[in-house]
């Protein structure tokens, strides 16, 4: 409908004194308005290429060169649709830009993104599905456990922060989602919103080194950890080194946690807690940087738990790749979620507590 015709209808309706005329107006105009969205036909083809590198990074939160590299891989992958449909095929670079725009803008609805890139909503859904799976399956090569050589550098970084023998920090985070259709109660977390959890281990440079996604929001961090592949291979991956975690996790030989503050901590225990907290803040910064860059992770409005898990992993892959291209701007740490004292793995805790006491004593002497 032409804008001038719409204005005439609005004006004539506003001058009407009968409610029936108003009802007729709504019946005529609203369907027209809802069916004819103003799309931006030139954004991807004309406006985006005009952006400087800085402007592109400000809009998309990742460098243009990264988009180009991933687009080339995506086009050669099984996830890029090659079947002829009778419609013009959307290029791989545009698909990557569409996905990244959606992922990095918290308030972006499907309608907003489809209008901006001049595509149908159904096409947008297909792009998100395909690109999310493509990036998610790259995680095996992008999110990797540090090599022995890398461990030396990571350990040295943490030692300079005051804690010896550390190769990573671990914590869990929640991604808010809409109420699931199946078993919604299990997704309702302690803060009374629906969420899916993901557990992350990061290194001293805030690079994600291990990720485990998919448990509902109501499940405690310790249970998520005990069901993760990391738990099963902890000794093999860490050897004599340790990962720092908060009190939600069990204190094991390779997982060091704070002493519970019951008001009677010794000077040695307080010193240990302070130094552990000083180093462990890196994982909070990692979550903060990740969610500030990919703001859909504050409230992900996709449907289907499997797609949601692939989307979260895809964002983590993009986050790690962007570390190779740019310096990460520091952001405020992510707000934590309530923890519950864990009662799992009591036998292993004995060895963990003994090693924690040894480390605490060594730190106090220094």
Image (spheres, rainbow, N blue to C red):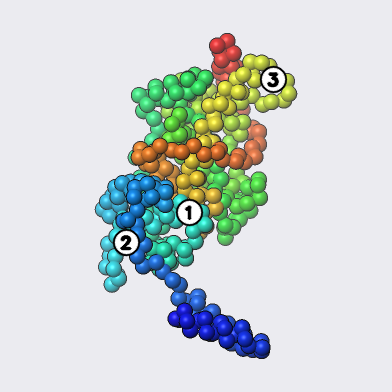
- Determine which of the numbered discs, if any, sits on residue 170 in the image: none
Q: Quadrant of the C terminus?
A: top right
C-alpha separation, residue under disc 3 versus residue under disc 1:
45 Å
Q: From what the image shows, is residue 307 above or below residue 33?
A: above
In this rendering, which labeled residue sits more in front, label 3 or label 2?
Answer: 2
Q: Is residue 364 left or right of residue 78?
A: right
Residue under label 3, please give it.
265
Q: Is residue 252 visible?
A: no
Q: Position of residue 248 (x, y in %)?
A: 61, 34
Q: Is residue 327 left or right of residue 284?
A: left
Residue under label 2, please give it.
46
Who's the residue at 37% across and 46% down the image?
54
Q: Nearer the viewer, residue 307 or 352?
A: 307
The earlier-in-sequence mark between 3 and 1 is 1
Who's the residue at 44% across and 23% down the image?
157
Residue under label 1, please give it.
105
Q: Position of residue 336 (x, y in %)?
A: 60, 39
Q: Residue 205, located in which quarter of the rendered image?
A: top left
Q: Position of residue 56 (x, y in %)?
A: 37, 50
Q: From what the image shows, is residue 16 above or below residue 217?
A: below
């Amino acid at each position: 409908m032409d804008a001038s015709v719409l204005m005439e209808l609005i004006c004539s309706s506003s001058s009407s004194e009968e409610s029936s005329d108003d009802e007729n107006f709504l019946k005529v105009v609203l369907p027209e308005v809802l069916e004819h969205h103003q799309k931006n036909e030139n954004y991807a083809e004309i406006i985006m290429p005009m952006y400087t590198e800085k402007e592109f990074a400000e809009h998309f939160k990742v460098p243009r060169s990264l988009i180009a590299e991933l687009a080339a891989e995506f086009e050669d992958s099984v996830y890029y649709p090659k079947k002829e449909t009778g419609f013009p095929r959307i290029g791989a670079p545009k698909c990557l830009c569409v996905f990244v725009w959606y992922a990095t803008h918290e308030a972006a609805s499907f309608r907003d993104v489809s209008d901006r890139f001049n595509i149908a909503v159904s096409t947008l859904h297909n792009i998100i599905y395909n690109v999310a799976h493509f990036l998610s399956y790259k995680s095996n090569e992008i999110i990797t456990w540090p090599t022995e050589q890398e461990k030396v550098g990571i350990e040295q970084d943490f030692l300079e922060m005051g804690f010896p023998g550390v190769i990573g920090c671990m914590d869990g985070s929640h991604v808010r989602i809409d109420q699931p259709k199946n078993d919604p109660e299990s997704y309702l977390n302690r803060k009374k919103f629906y969420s899916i959890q993901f557990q992350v281990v990061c290194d001293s440079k805030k690079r994600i080194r291990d990720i485990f996604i998919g448990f509902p929001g109501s499940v405690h961090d310790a249970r998520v950890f005990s069901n993760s592949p990391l738990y099963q291979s902890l000794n093999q991956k860490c050897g004599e080194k340790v990962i720092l975690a908060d009190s939600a996790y069990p204190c094991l030989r390779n997982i060091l946690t704070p002493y519970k503050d019951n008001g009677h901590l010794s000077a040695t225990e307080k010193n240990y807690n302070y130094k552990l907290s000083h180093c462990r803040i890196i994982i909070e910064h990692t979550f903060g940087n990740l969610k500030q860059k990919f703001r859909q992770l504050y409230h992900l409005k996709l449907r289907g738990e499997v797609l949601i898990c692939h989307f979260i992993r895809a964002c983590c892959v993009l986050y790690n790749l962007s570390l190779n291209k740019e310096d990460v701007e520091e952001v405020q740490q992510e707000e934590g979620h309530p923890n519950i004292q864990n009662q799992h793995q009591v036998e292993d805790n004995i060895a963990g507590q003994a090693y924690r006491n040894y480390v605490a004593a060594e730190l106090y002497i220094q």
